[in-house]
Amino acid sequence: MSATLLGQSILSGIFAGSLYALIGLGMSLSWRYLRVINLAHFAFVFFAAYLTYEFAGVRGVNPFVVALALVPLFFLLGVLQQALILRFNVNEFSSVIVTYGLAIVAEALIQLIWSADYVRYENRAMHGNLALGTLLFPVADLVMAGIALGLCFAVWAVLHFTWLGKALRAGLDNPQIAASFGVPNQRLLLLVAGSAGALAAIGGFFVAVLYTLAPSQIFSWLGVVFAAVLLGGLGNPIGLVAASLLIGVSEAITMAITAPSWAPVVPFTLLILLLVLWPERV
Amino acid sequence: MQGRNFAAATRRSMLIAGFGLTLAIGALAPATAQQPSGPPIRIGGTLALTGPLAQTGAIHKIVGDLFVEQLNKKGGLLGRPVEWVLLDDQSKPDVTRTLYERLITVDKVDLIIGPYATASILSAMAVAQRYNKILVHSTFGIPKLATYERQFPGWPLGFEPEKGMPAAALDALNATGKGPKSIAVVTSKFPSVQFVAAGAREVAKSRGLKEALYLEFEFGTRDFGPIAARVREADADFLFMGAIGLEGNQLLEALEKLNYKPRNHFYVYPTPGPMASSPLGDGALSNTAFENLPPLNANPSAAAFAKSFNEAAAKAGLPYTEPETQAGASWSAWEILTGAVAATKSLDDKVLTDWLKKNGADTIIGHISFDGPNNYGPDLMRIKQVQKGKWVIIWPKDIATPGYSPQAK
């Protein structure tokens, strides 16, 4: 195996891992701070991806305008979903069933609007690649990875260095005491839900830019992103980045040096190892 | 072309089949002005209307709806209206098995017709065998597994597609004078394409091609970057991909990111629209049973089918509205089943089976006979290629789209 093949494969793994982190970030925040295992997050991602295809691809709207419009829209959708979850007192475990049901409904809705057939957003805005020696860096992947890693670090910084982060942690530890210190728990929960929705929109935008879409693909990301979220630690953006890159690069190296069919085994092997060797992490 | 029987696929035989088909349709509707009456003949089946195979399931649903609608307008079957009892198998073979049990034992349909995709057809076949029901199906990919004597394929891909398909692709490339010297075989582990890829290795070996790469990947793989890096490094003259659905496009997109384009490339069962419409698909080869192209659409029935499918697919919102293998094989399955009923004036499974084995069937694909192993007759598949942004048939020569021939680099 040549150094170029190894290097290019590792790059591919970094880009794949970055997308896992981008999609997983909202889910990780929901799970930690809202106690909602939000499988509908994947439906949000794909709904945003289809809207990107529809407006940027079919109707010719500037893709960056579409991305900017999706963020507040999905913030509101996230808030609405959380308001319903609070209204009906859905607990952490029930949330799996409820949000899975929502994802199924979303899949049917997407199929109704855009058909079950494949659709592709032919993106020209982030086309081509950059060369560094023998390695090639696709522009779209590079932009996605930059935004994904930037968002993860930004969320980490907000959680650790701002009043908001402290208030969220306080509310998680003891909502009554936090409230007595003026922490608006309910509004903060809605803010987290909205942020998770907005992150899903950004993830969906890049899924549309990088992949051909079909409604049934909603669940194809579930396993690997779930593994990354658990490996990284709930509500821990830096851990999520590390876990996602570990999974992405491990998968890529596996594909480069052995049969690619072994690659899907990687994230779950890592997850099982974590559960066996470090159970308190999960 | 050795070992392949293309006799039935010549222009003349296509026309004969077309006239035969027209006569058969006439037989279905002896008094076309008459409305069918009496209790409906109920034909039960399932399709992948949801789940990972729903993209193709949607094509089969459009075809079935069209066929039944047109059949009823022309007087139905045996003077009775036809009702298609369709259930969603969710792309799951286990669900398919349960639903066919229900169709036969609870819904008590008169006849059954196959679902979509090899695994689901195999499930339905087991149920049909248990109840001695005739099963006509459309796109079953592994003929060796179709051992039930009352099953009939509407997709005439021959008994050994794992040999015929790669051999025909290599024949087409060799005809350009630029035949490949090396091959990279990359395949999904989806059963009906993996075994064709394995066959391609054998065919390539027997013809003295150097195997530069052989890779298997899981169905559902999202990241093709590392696979693309290996294909680029192998740099074979010919990339043979055991691809189903979108996998071919995914690999081509990953290769483009590495500034690499395969010189010659073949995909077993690609989704036709994205491959033809993508600039990366230029020169891509595949196989086909039917295209809306001369001479395959030369007979009036095929042309009428293509037109109505175009309209129905557009109405259903499908991005690619041209009928090809899936639509053609689906239509031919309906033709086989209803043609046998009309000819025998019977709904008895044994009577229908015996008649089909003896007579075969005239379909839009051509005359399909069931006189080979596992009821698979001659291989009527053709090789097609993306040229100037559209699929055209390029092999064998006598069935090629006029004005087109194989292109190789």
Image (cartoon, coloured by chain):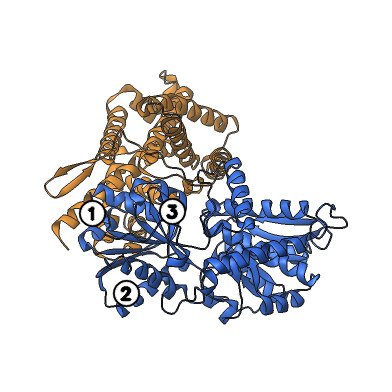
Q: In the picture, residue A160 is in which quadrant?
A: top left
Image height check: is A212 above or below A125?
below
Q: Position of residue B94 (x, y in %)?
A: 60, 64
For badge 2, the amino acid type reads Ala
Q: Is residue A186 left or right of residue A29?
A: right
Give the chain of mark 2: B
The alpha-carbon separation of the residues under discs 1 and 2 comes to 28 Å
Callout 1 touching callout 3 (CB < 8 Å): no
Residue type for callout 1: Ser
Residue beneath disc 3: B391
Residue tagged 1: A9
**Where does residue B165 sit, x and y in percent of width and height?**
43, 70
- Judge if badges 1 and 3 mark residues of a common chain: no
Q: Indicate the quadrant containing the N terminus of chain B: top left, top right, bottom left or bottom right.
A: bottom left
User: Could you tell me how far apart the alpha carbons at marks 1 and 3 are, in whole angstroms?
Assistant: 33 Å
Q: Which residue is mark 2?
A: B204
Q: Chain of mark 1?
A: A
**What's under tag 3, amino acid-wise?**
Trp
Q: Which chain is blue?
A: B
Discs 2/3, front: 3
Q: Position of residue A127 (x, y in %)?
A: 28, 38
Which color was chain A given? orange
Dot 2 falls on a residue whose secondary structure is: helix
Q: Is residue B213 visible?
A: no
User: Foreground residue, A137 or A172?
Assistant: A137
